[in-house]
C-alpha cells in the first residue's frame, strides 16, 4: 500500500493524522495545494491593455496622499467603468481591474446578487468570509438576517417580479483580509464602478446598509443618527439602515430596523 508523503518523506497513517490535526490546530481550515502559495509574490500579470484615460475624476472621499499611483488607478477605474454599457460588461471590467491590492488575497470576485431589475438596490460594505467563498454578497450570517428582514416586507433576492425583488451589491467587490474596514484607497478605486453599477441597475430606491455605504453615498458616517431618514445618494432616494451585522450584535436595534423596513415598504407602495 502507498503511504502518504510529506516533503518527500513517507509517513505512516498515524503520523499523517497527527500532522493533519496539528495543521487544523494552527488554523489551516482548507486544503489547497501541496505547497504554500504566497499570492503577494506572484509574477506580475501581463500588462492590461492601454485604455485612453478620461480626465481624472476626484474621488468622493478625502484620501491620505500616501499612495502616489492612486490618482492613475482611480482614473483607470473611471475609464473602465464608463466604457461598460451593461452590468455584465461592468462586472467583467471590474473583475479584470488590477488596481486594487485586495484582489490578490481574495478567493472570489463578489459583484452582486438578486434581480438587477429590482426597484430596490441594497448597498453593503464588503464581502466577508462566506461571500468570498461563494462569490455572492450577503450569504453569511448577516446575509441570512438581511434575507429575513426583506422577506418580512415581501421583498426577496429570488423574486422575478421587479416589484417584489431586491438587488444587492457592496462598495468593495473583494474581501478585506480578516474582515477589516475598507481603506480609503480601496474605496476610491471602487467608487467609479459603484457609481456606474447603480447607474446601470437604475433602481428607484437605494438602501445604504451601514456606515461605509453612508460614507460613500452621503459623504457622512454616524449610522445610528442617519438611519431611518430618507436622503439622496447617487441621484436617487436613499434610506440609511443599520447593518445586519450590527443587528446580530445588538438585537434590540431590530426594532428601529423594522420601522425602517416599514418606511421603505410604504415608499415603494406610494404610501409615503
Ligand atoms: N457584509 C456586507 O456589507 N456585505 C456582504 O456582502 C457581507 C457582509
Image: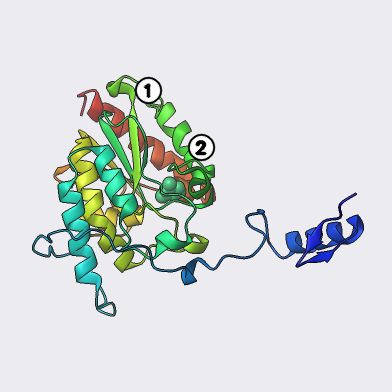
In the depicted view, which residue is nearer to us: 98 or 25?
98
Locate residue 88 relative to residue 26 in the image: left or right: left
Q: Position of residue 195 (x, y in %)?
A: 20, 49
* Residue 192 versus residue 44 in the image, above or below: above
Locate residue 72 relative to residue 7 in the image: left or right: left
In the depicted view, which residue is nearer to us: 242 or 102?
102
> Which residue does the numbered mark 1 point to in the structure image?
159
Q: Position of residue 226 (x, y in %)?
A: 29, 52
Is residue 61 at least partly visible in the picture? no
Secondary structure under the numbered disc 2 in the rendered image = helix
Q: CA distance from mark 2 to mark 1?
A: 16 Å
Q: Position of residue 25 (x, y in %)?
A: 75, 62
Is residue 235 at least partly visible in the picture? yes
Residue at 86%, 55% in the rendered image: 3
Secondary structure under the numbered disc 1 in the rendered image = loop
* Residue 88 versus residue 9 in the image, above or below: above
Locate residue 130 relative to residue 265 in the image: left or right: right
Q: Which mark is residue 111?
A: none
Q: Position of residue 78 (x, y in %)?
A: 18, 57
Q: Which mark is residue 144?
A: 2
Amino acid at each position: 500500500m502507498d503511504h502518504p508523503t510529506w516533503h518527500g518523506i513517507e509517513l505512516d497513517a498515524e503520523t499523517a493524522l497527527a500532522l493533519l490535526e496539528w495543521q487544523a490546530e494552527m488554523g489551516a481550515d482548507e486544503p489547497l495545494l501541496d505547497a504554500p502559495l504566497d499570492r503577494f509574490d506572484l509574477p506580475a500579470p501581463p500588462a492590461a491593455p492601454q485604455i485612453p484615460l478620461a480626465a481624472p475624476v476626484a474621488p468622493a472621499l478625502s484620501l491620505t496622499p500616501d499612495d502616489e499611483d492612486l490618482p492613475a488607478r482611480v482614473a483607470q477605474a473611471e475609464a473602465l467603468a464608463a466604457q461598460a454599457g451593461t452590468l455584465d460588461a461592468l462586472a467583467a471590467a471590474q473583475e479584470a481591474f488590477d488596481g486594487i491590492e485586495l484582489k490578490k488575497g481574495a478567493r472570489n470576485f463578489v459583484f452582486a446578487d438578486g434581480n438587477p431589475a429590482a426597484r430596490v438596490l441594497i448597498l453593503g460594505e464588503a464581502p466577508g468570509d462566506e461571500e468570498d467563498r461563494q462569490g455572492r454578497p450577503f450569504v453569511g450570517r448577516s446575509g441570512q438576517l438581511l434575507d429575513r428582514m426583506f422577506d418580512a416586507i415581501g421583498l426577496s433576492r429570488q423574486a422575478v417580479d421587479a416589484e417584489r425583488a431586491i438587488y444587492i451589491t457592496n462598495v468593495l467587490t473583494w474581501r478585506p483580509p480578516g474582515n477589516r474596514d475598507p481603506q480609503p484607497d480601496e474605496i476610491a478605486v471602487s467608487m467609479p464602478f459603484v457609481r456606474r453599477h447603480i447607474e446601470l441597475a437604475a433602481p428607484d430606491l437605494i438602501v445604504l446598509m451601514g456606515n461605509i455605504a453612508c460614507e460613500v453615498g452621503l459623504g457622512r458616517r454616524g449610522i445610528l443618527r442617519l438611519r431611518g431618514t430618507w436622503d439622496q445618494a447617487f441621484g436617487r432616494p436613499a434610506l440609511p439602515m443599520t447593518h445586519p451585522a450590527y443587528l446580530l450584535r445588538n438585537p434590540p436595534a431590530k426594532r428601529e430596523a423594522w420601522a425602517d423596513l416599514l418606511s421603505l415598504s410604504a415608499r415603494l407602495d406610494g404610501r409615503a
